[in-house]
Image (cartoon, rainbow, N blue to C red):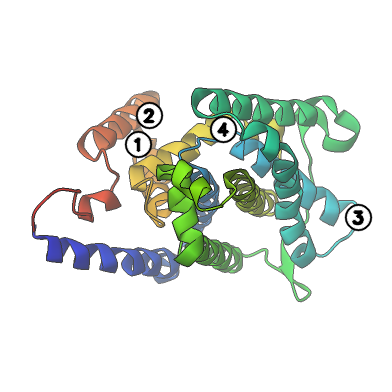
Amino acid sequence: MSARIRSFAAAAAGPALLAALVLLPPLLGRPFHYHLGILVGINALLALSMQVMLRINQLSLAQAGFMGLGAYASALLTRDIGLPFAAALPLAGLLPALLAGALGPVLLRVRGVHFVLLTFALGEVIVLVFVEWVSLFGGNNGLLDIPPASLFGTALRAKPAFYALTAATLLAALALCRWVTRGERGMIVAGLAGNEPLLQSLGVDALPHRCALFAFSAFLAGLAGSLYAHYFGYISPEAFGFWTAVNALIMGVLGGVTLLLGPLTGAVLLVPLPELFRDAIAYQRLFYGLALMALLLFLPRGLLGVLRTPKGSTP
């Protein structure tokens, strides 16, 4: 495939994927397809939050914990305080963003595996708080009777309505990420990943920018948690543990770590995968693992990465 064809295919893949996500469930019209579309959107939003940090070569395993903070915050604000969902949704993103912003100056002074371990510990501490603070978070039993999402006084109980909300939230998050990674801001993000000493020589203080991206990634994870809580109507600490973060990481890697639509591509591919093996329930985990190994082996740069011309290749 020539470089020109690759470039055209890569440019067309993004809009085509977005169109497929938005239009396919309504075209199929079955509740199950809307359900899958909602799960894809929520998981893509969490994977997108992780990709924000991966763009600066920092792997954060606290994203599932931030998602849990958003879920519990949104549930408590709407169920116990009576706040409208339209106000609880942004606040669910703001709370983990404030926590990440407060801890960022400490956590982001370290790099590599040490940062990974610190964020892993942070995520586990957040989950432990959910478990031990029974009076507020319900402990291992979680929270029940979370009200459905509502906008303008209309409850979004039907799957098509909640699907539209999830798709709109994801599209807004993608637009924000595109804004962050373009222009002068994008140059700073690229510099944080590739040549931080050069940025510092130009008078750019790297740490505040890293902290801002960490807070932004936590904000996106909190939004995913809010949608999760109001879709299922029930949340428990186990939903926001280590493996939730690992699954989000896998989605990002499968789609393409450096591509804006990589997390969405990975979620479209990964979320429906267990359904393909439903009839072989005894071997579901085996087939699921083999499928992941095959995808990572034959598509090391991710699904969308196939369409990109490798550096150093000729047209």
Tell me which amino acid carries mark 1. Answer: Phe
Q: Which comes before the other along the chain, label 2 or label 3?
A: 3
For marks 2 and 1, give the CA distance: 5 Å
Question: Which residue is denoted by mark 4 in the rendering?
Answer: 61
Asked if residue 310 lies left or right of residue 150, the reply is left
Q: Position of residue 114 (x, y in %)?
A: 55, 23
Quadrant into which the C terminus falls: bottom left
State the residue position of label 3.
81
Of circles 3 and 1, the one toward us is 3
Let me know if residue 136 appears in the view: yes
Disc 3 + disc 1, Cβ < 8 Å: no
Q: Are the residues tagged 4 and 1 within 8 Å (C-beta)? A: no
Please tell me which residue is depicted at 28% across the width and 67% down the height of the picture: 11
Amino acid residing under circle 3: Ile
Taking the image as drawn, is residue 33 in sight?
no
Given residues 33 and 163, the one toward you in this image is 163
Q: Residues within 10 Å of mark 4 (few under 14, many from 20)?
A: many
Label 2: few (<14), some (14–19) or many (≥20) C-alpha neighbours in 10 Å = some
Residue drawn where x is 75% and y is 25% of the image: 128
Secondary structure at badge 1 equals loop
User: Which numbered dot is residue 284?
Assistant: 2
